[in-house]
Image (cartoon, rainbow, N blue to C red):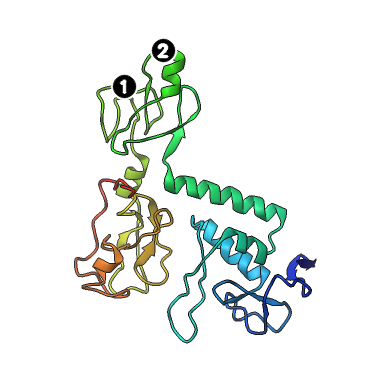
Amino acid sequence: MTTRGEGEKRYDPRDTTLKFVNRPDDLDPLQEGDRCLRAEMSCGHAVTPESLTGWCRSLLDQGQYKFKCPALKNGTLQKCDAVWSYQEVRRLAVLTSDEMQHFEENIARLAAIEYCEFKTCPGCKTYVEREDLTNLSVQCTICQADKKEVYQFCWQCLKPWKGKAPRADRCDNDGCVNHDLQLLKNCKDTSLPQVQGVDKCPSIRACPTCGQRVEHDKTGCKNIICPRCQVEFCFVCLKLTPECLRTSSYFIPCSTGVAPRQTSIPVWHRN
């Protein structure tokens, strides 16, 4: 399917399973000349093995395991956003065995983070999933079976549970604190240079949908997409984007101003 010269991946022109096109790479329009064949993705956009690998790897680095096309729809300013399957990406990116291992390990890890919340039980060292996301007191059924008695530990400090339960803030062990919450309270201020009037805003926020800790890269508009739940929200006012845009726009101040530092972390209620 490919030849590799000087470390660069190329399509094999004899590969009849791919549709080759004679137009610029939609993921890297500034690529020079005709040094590399371009193939057409299922959404109709042209790619090279290098540009497709680079884009999908960047998504994984941002915590996103669903591969979406970033190219613009023909004749519009609207992103394509078509979802490519991993099988399609693997084939047209001509992934090496090392790249496949990297992709598959990260896809599995990110999917687990999205659909499960698990930690290692301090008693038996097995993975435990928390059913009640509002209760830090977790009971391990494996330890209970082994020890013939109830074993509870703290989801936050990972020590045997101490004190009354249920509790959502902490147990009675010394040093049991929510480090993410402390970070939200004490993080430095930042600015969003391309958003009018936003020169002082907390640099770290908790996603209002799932509670994932996120930062703004200080480029573009004030809205970001959470890498965990994929919900878009305003980094400034913390409203979901559709609600924020009812009284504002992407690059002007929010009607309610800058939301204060968060003092609690939202719990993700998955549907």
Q: Residue at x 76, y 65 (%)?
A: 7
Q: Is residue 122 above or below residue 220?
A: above
Eyeballing the image, is 183 above or below 79?
Answer: above
Amino acid marked by disc 2 = Lys
> Which residue is under mark 1?
162
Q: Earlier in the sequence, mark 2 or mark 1?
A: 2
| x 36%, y 17%: residue | 150
- Kind of residue sitting beneath label 1: Lys
Residue 147 picture quarter: top left
Q: In x, y percent, where is residue 262?
A: 26, 51
Left or right: 85, with 143 as reference point:
right
Q: Are marks 2 and 1 in contact (CB under 8 Å)?
A: no
What is the crowding at mark 2: few (fewer than 14 residues within 10 Å), some, or many (at least 20)? few
Check the picture and name the quadrant holding the N terminus: bottom right
The x, y position of residue 71, in whole percent, is 52, 76
Query: Residue under circle 2?
Result: 148
Q: Position of residue 188 (x, y in %)?
A: 35, 54
Q: Quadrant of residue 89?
A: bottom right
Foreground pick, 59 / 189: 59
Q: Give the quadrant of residue 95.
A: bottom right
